[in-house]
Image (cartoon, rainbow, N blue to C red):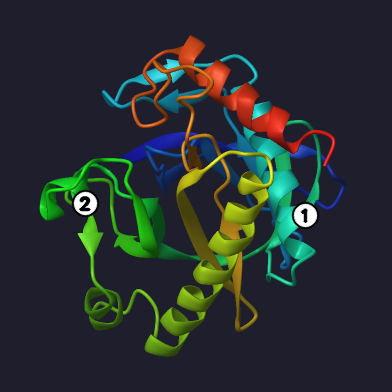
Amino acid sequence: MIDFIYVKFLTSTSNFIKRKVKNIRMTKKRNIKEILPESNLVLKLIEYYDFFINTKNKKISAKNFGEKTALLNSYFFEFLKGYNIPIAFEKKVDTKSLQFLKYTEFPFRVKILNSADVRTSKIFSIKPGLPLELPIQQYHYGESKDSVITESHIVSFNLCSYDELKITNRLCSKINAIVKSFFERRNVSLVELICLFGKFDGKIYLIGDFSPLSIKVETSHIDEKLDPYKIETFAQMKKYTDFLIKLTSGD
């Protein structure tokens, strides 16, 4: 979906100027906008908005959601840096904005399944939520329901090179193991994780995403009615987001 949006550009005097920009692609599933400093060839800002797109594809306003999303992302970025994962994140600028290296994002996302999702359960006739012996890496492109693609698609359509894909695969395996262990130490099962990657100065970095929309954990022991795959209301999102933030406190 192509929209007209207002993007803030940082000038050399650190003042923000609003300009109307055409042909900015807004990812429907992510509540972000990029802030590209004209005077800085190395860094850019990501600002998180107070809304999310629910399972019925409706935009839901959510007070403090941008702030909480920025908090979760900055926490896990710093956490993974401690395990020598290449992270494009530099620092938290304010409550809703994070500073990154000025990466070029790979136009696909990697969904890592530790338990069977609905699609997998239908294909293999197993129960949704069944733990998998080995994590499954799925590649997704675009926002359609049938967005699953293969490694051959990625290389054939030049979404990244084969060597770059091998690097992202290795990083995904390591990231999933680290984050899965993080939750297990808190007696919580990581069901699904989405990884986004970008490239800066010839090197591949993890650029996201640790929002409540991308991290799926088992919640039945908290609230049997709270399913991270079926969050439709602000109240449900607030409860799930606050639960994730609570898990990161005191670590």
Q: Do we see residue 17 in this rendering? A: no
In this rendering, the count of numbered labels is 2
Report the front residue among 41 and 174: 174
Residue 251 point in image, percent of width and height:
82, 42
Q: Which residue is mark 2?
A: 120
Numbered label attached to residue 203: none
SS for dot 1 = helix
Q: Is residue 57 left or right of residue 214?
A: left
- For the point 37% across and 37% down, the residue is 28
Q: Nearer the viewer, mark 1 or mark 2?
A: 2
Q: Which residue is mark 1?
A: 78
Report the front residue among 121 and 72: 121
Image position of 54 with respect to 189: above or below: above
Q: Can you tell which quarter of the image residue 85 is in?
A: bottom right
- For the point 32% across and 62% down, the residue is 138
- For the point 41% across and 42% down, the residue is 26
